[in-house]
């Protein structure tokens, strides 16, 4: 059970992110200041900086959480399924939660339109690819640098994920991102072969 202090910190963190997303959606990323976010969240701007040192880190908080939720199961030594199945399942479930979520849809569109956020996002996908390639190699008893096939499969699945997100971001919020991803991932794995 978390302490009262930890729960208060988590509430403050959520209030800051909620305030930022509200302002980003109404004023745009560039026009929103951290001072405005702090004011809307009813905290001092120095409090905001303790949680988020930059506007970029604040804007990407929820998306970074998604990347952590995708990587964590891959790194879990007790995971039951192979790395590819784990990645495809977790990513698909994650995409399923996005369908119809207009606020999240707007957030992804903002990330796509703001170069610094897009660059950070591509870096996070690179980290996802490395985590997936490492997990595939471990499943096969190989060092990641020796598992060329695993690395290629990881890159392919991450590319399919990015393509799905870009298409969803440019389409309507109710675009079937999960179906798009699962169909293409199954096709790629069927054609290229699962590491094994």
Image: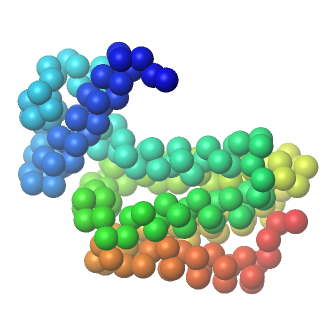
Which residue: 23% across, 19% down?
A: 47
Residue in the picture at 31% in, 70% down: 100
Residue 62 visible to an observer of this rendering: yes
At a point 72% along the width and 63% down the height, the residue shown is 84
Q: How many marks?
A: 0
In the picture, which quadrant includes the C terminus?
Answer: bottom right
In the rendered image, residue 175, in percent from the top left (x then y), is placed at 36, 79
Q: Indicate the position of residue 99 as horizontal and vertical percent values.
A: 37, 70
Residue drawn where x is 40% and y is 49% of the image: 63
Q: Residue furthest right?
A: 141
Q: Position of residue 12 (x, y in %)?
A: 26, 28
Colour basis = rainbow
- The x, y position of residue 52, in whole percent, is 31, 29
- In the rendered image of this protein, does residue 42 appear above or below residue 3? below
In this view, the residue farthest toward the front is: 1
Q: Is residue 43 above or below residue 20?
A: above
* 86 left or right, relative to 24: right
The answer to which image quadrant residue 57 occupies is: top left
Residue 35 visible in the snapshot:
no
Give the answer, above or below, for where 148 lies relative to 55. Answer: below
């Amino acid at each position: 059970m978390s302490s009262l202090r930890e729960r208060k910190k988590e509430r403050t963190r959520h209030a800051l992110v909620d305030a930022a997303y509200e302002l980003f959606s109404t004023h745009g990323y560039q026009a929103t200041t951290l001072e405005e976010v702090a004011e809307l969240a009813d905290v001092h701007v120095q409090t905001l900086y303790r949680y988020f040192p930059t506007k970029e880190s604040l804007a990407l908080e929820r998306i970074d959480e998604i990347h952590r939720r995708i990587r964590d199961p891959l790194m879990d030594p007790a995971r039951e399924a192979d790395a590819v199945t784990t990645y495809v399942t977790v990513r698909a479930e994650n995409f399923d939660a996005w369908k119809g979520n207009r606020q999240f849809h707007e957030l992804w569109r903002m990330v796509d339109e703001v170069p610094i956020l897009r660059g950070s996002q591509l870096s996070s996908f690179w980290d996802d690819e490395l985590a997936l390639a490492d997990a595939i190699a471990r499943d096969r008893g190989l060092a990641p640098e020796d598992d060329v096939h695993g690395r290629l499969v990881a890159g392919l699945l991450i590319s399919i994920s990015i393509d799905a997100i870009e298409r969803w971001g440019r389409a309507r919020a109710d675009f079937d991102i999960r179906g798009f991803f699962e169909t293409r991932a199954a096709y790629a794995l069927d054609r290229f072969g699962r590491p094994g």
